[in-house]
């Protein structure tokens, strides 16, 4: 453990900027999520910073690229200095072999997260270049807000469509969705509301 392992950082400036980006997206539920994030910002919520993730999670090799990419949303600049030291993980989902090591996420708000909340989850998602995230679904309603990178997104049986930074994508309860990156890595904010508890996540294999 390094001397930095217990450092804490005030996340309220980023949460406020994230809330503004959520409101700007305009999909159903985004205004409510923005309000919840602002409430946590008002409480001056903070997170512990960790070291060592970059060597353990292959996808994090692409994080620096997403933080400085042309056209990224301004709220990235508020999290960029500490992004590598957030509590990134691949979770414990069973993933297809082709997708393992190609993604990482951090939960900033929610049960067991740096900022406790029993009603929502909110965090960041990173996907490596040239990576296909197969169709998957879950009970929670989900909103993605693209911060950096233009990936192809699919909802249900719709055709894949490019979503540049600033795009917001709503996935309804149990609605299949998939993401496909090309040359650029993807960095996005994600949030869950509704039925966020229980093991309802499934993915095509």
Image (cartoon, grey):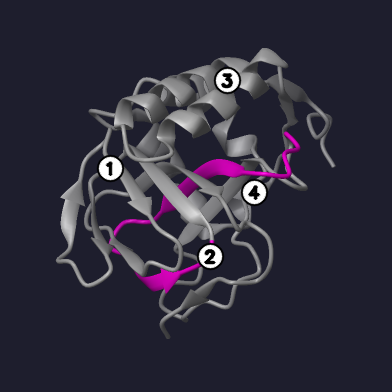
* On-image quarter of the C terminus: bottom left
How much space separates mark 4 and mark 2, taking CA atoms? 29 Å
Task: Look at mark 1 in the image and give the residue it sits on.
Answer: 149
Task: Look at mark 2 in the image and give the residue it sits on.
Answer: 139
Answer whether residue 47 is visible to the viewer in this image: yes
Q: Residues within 10 Å of mark 2 (few under 14, many from 20)?
A: many
How much space separates mark 1 and mark 2, taking CA atoms? 27 Å
At numbered mark 1, what does the secondary structure look like: helix, strand or loop? Answer: loop
Choose top left, top right, bottom left or bottom right for residue 77: top left
Residue at the (57%, 27%) spot, across then down: 37
Q: Residues within 10 Å of mark 1 (few under 14, many from 20)?
A: many
Say whether residue 129 is magenta.
yes
Find out whether the residues at labels 3 and 4 contact each other: C-beta distance under 8 Å. no
| Residue 178: x %, y % from top left | 33, 66
Mark 3 or 4, which is nearer the eye? 3
Mark 4 or 2, which is nearer the eye? 2
Q: Residues within 10 Å of mark 3 (few under 14, many from 20)?
A: many
Question: Which label sits on residue 38?
Answer: 3
- Magenta residues? 115-139
At numbered mark 4, what does the secondary structure look like: helix, strand or loop? Answer: helix
Locate residue 38 relative to residue 166 in the image: left or right.
right
How much space separates mark 2 and mark 3, taking CA atoms? 25 Å
């Amino acid at each position: 453990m390094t001397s930095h392992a217990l450092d804490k950082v005030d996340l309220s400036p980023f949460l406020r900027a994230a809330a503004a980006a959520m409101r700007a997206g305009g999909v159903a539920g985004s205004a409510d999520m923005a309000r919840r994030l602002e409430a946590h910002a008002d409480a001056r919520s903070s997170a512990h910073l960790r070291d060592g993730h970059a060597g353990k999670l292959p996808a994090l090799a692409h994080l620096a690229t997403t933080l400085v990419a042309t056209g990224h949303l301004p709220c990235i600049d508020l999290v960029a200095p500490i992004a590598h030291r957030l509590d990134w993980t691949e979770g414990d989902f069973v993933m297809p072999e082709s997708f393992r090591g190609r993604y990482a996420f951090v939960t900033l708000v929610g049960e067991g997260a740096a900022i406790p909340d029993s009603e929502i989850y909110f965090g960041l998602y990173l996907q490596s270049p040239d990576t296909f995230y197969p169709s998957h679904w879950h009970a929670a309603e989900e909103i993605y807000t693209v911060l950096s990178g233009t990936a192809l997104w699919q909802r249900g049986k719709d055709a894949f469509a490019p979503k540049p930074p600033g795009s917001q994508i709503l996935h309804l309860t149990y609605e299949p969705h998939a993401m496909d990156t090309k040359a650029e890595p993807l960095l996005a904010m994600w949030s869950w509301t509704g039925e966020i508890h229980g093991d309802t996540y499934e993915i095509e294999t």
